[in-house]
Amino acid sequence: MKFIKLKRTFREGMDNFRRNGWLSFATVSVLAISLYVISITIILGVTANMVLRNIQDKINVSVYFNTDIEENRILEIKSKLTGYQEISSIEYVSKEQALEQFKKMGDKNPSITQALAEIGDNPLLSALVIKAKHPSQYDLIAKAITNSNFSADVSRIDFEENKTAIDRLSSIIKLVEKVGLTLGIVFVFIGVLITFNAIRLTMYAHKQEFEIMRLVGASNIYIRMPFVFEGILYGAVSAFVVMICIFITSKFLAPITQGSISGGDIVSFYFANFFIIFGGLLISGIFLGTLSGVIAIKRYLKV
Amino acid sequence: MLKFENVSKIYPGNFVALEDINLQIEKGEFLSIVGHSGSGKSTLLKLIYAEEQVTGGHVYFNDRSIDSINRKHLPYYRRNIGTVFQDFKLLPQKTAFENVAYALEVSDETDEEIKELVPEILDIVGMGDKANKYPRQLSGGEQQKICLARALVRKPLIIIADEPTGNLDPVATWEIVQLLLKINSMGTTILLATHNKDIVDKLNRRVIALDQGKIIRDHQKGRYAI
């Protein structure tokens, strides 16, 4: 297509957008609402996931060894466990280190220091702190250790104490993933549908103009292009609007999410992913706008 | 220049709009087409600007059958023809200037040519001072003059006017007719479909009368009679 055509049809599209003020406002609103709902669903899903992963990261299982077990033996067991697929990390905490950590807690709570002074000896046990790749796997790891040939060296595993919390967490993660995905799909579908309808109505309003344009000898592409540009414009403007709305929403949600996301709160998440979110919105907005426009014109434009 | 050869047009539902039409129109003619509503005037004109296709026979434009034109090329063919309608068909979101300019833009005229030609044409139809008005700010007669300017600006070979005065008061009607005569005197063929007896009688040019899709009269210096 010649440059002059491109320039003129682009200008036409801009003029249409500007001069059909209310219609453009309505279309952009509908498109923005769909995009907003879709992106909030996605962002909430991602945030919930991050919160859960964050909690998950703090969960572990400690295996305590009998006092008579040498450090070498424990390290040997550690290297054996490293081979397990389900385990993501193992940390060795000697009883001296454990005592250090315990004393540190004593800085805040004097009764701990007092208790330690009374016992005199180090009452703590050496331990392996194990993290699983997935919360549901702790059960398996605990069982494997209980049934292993070094189970006699093990004093106790604190898994049972954490079991309920871990179970609950893993079921919540599964639920959030399922609900988020379902909601996401439903909202995307609804969004596409109402956007398509809004733009179809806009095109219907232009229907008579198509006829006039044809009569003065405009080729199909010349009639169609301004509306494609109009669709692009709807998408782009909606993306800007939604970007602002999401910012306000995340500001509002920030106090709730404070500390539960590794990067701070949801506002910092927003800024850290600004270009990804904006790019995604822009692309989906333009895609939705253009596609609906093209389909609608096809319907109303005959040669 | 225009030739209808055994043309018939039957709309879906077996509604016969035109039947066995044979008609020859020469370059520079001013032809009035009269007839009752539904007699086939508009259909006859639509066949010329390819809004409708013939069911039987052929319509030739400069010896070329219109139905042989590739659909893709129809926009280019339509640029030979200027059209004016009872309901004006101006683009509501464009000013008078832009409406006229649009006809030039679609045929890739340069911006310089547009800036030069449009005011010239608007002056010819006497609308030079209303260039920046939107259609809703203009009277019916003024809107119709803009339509004429738009039809004229590309220097078409034919101007088709389908009831152009149907919505106008007598004064505006005569202004439009005067303009059509002026355009015709510059060599453009004019086809005018009308109900207005006064116009046809005063014009004293060729008149054809249609009734139920057939040509019932064709007089070189005719009067309004059906």
Image (cartoon, rainbow, N blue to C red):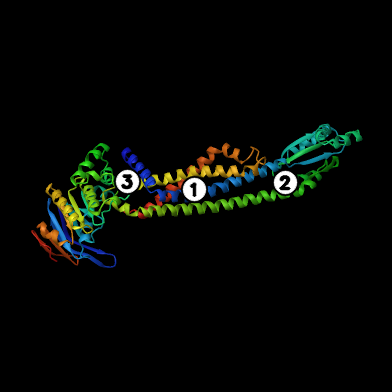
Q: Is residue A227 left or right of residue A91?
A: left
Q: Chain of mark 3?
A: A
Q: Is residue A266 left or right of residue B129?
A: right
Q: Which residue is mark 2?
A: A137
Q: Secondary structure at mark 1?
A: helix
Q: Position of residue A68 (x, y in %)?
A: 88, 35
Q: Nearer the viewer, residue B191 or B49?
A: B191
Q: Is residue A95 above or below residue A29?
A: above
Q: Is residue A185 above or below residue B114?
A: below
Q: Residue at x 36, y 44 (%)?
A: A15
Residue A256's mark? none
Q: Is residue A140 left or right of residue B182?
A: right
Label 2 vs label 3: CA separation? 62 Å
Residue A222's mark? 3
Q: Residue at x 76, y 35 (%)?
A: A91
Q: Which quadrant of the view contains residue A5?
A: top left
Neighbour class for label 2 at 10 Å: few (<14), some, many (≥20)? some
Q: Quadrant of the N terminus of chain A?
A: top left
Q: Which quadrant of the view contains residue B206?
A: bottom left
Q: Position of residue B32 (x, y in %)?
A: 14, 58
Circle nearer the viewer, 2 or 1? 1
Which one is earlier in the sequence, the residue at label 2 or at label 3?
2
Which one is earlier in the sequence, the residue at label 1 or at label 3?
1
Marks 2 and 3 on same chain:
yes
Q: Chain of mark 2?
A: A
Label 2 vs label 1: CA separation? 42 Å
Q: Which residue is mark 1?
A: A32
The kind of residue tagged 2 is Gln
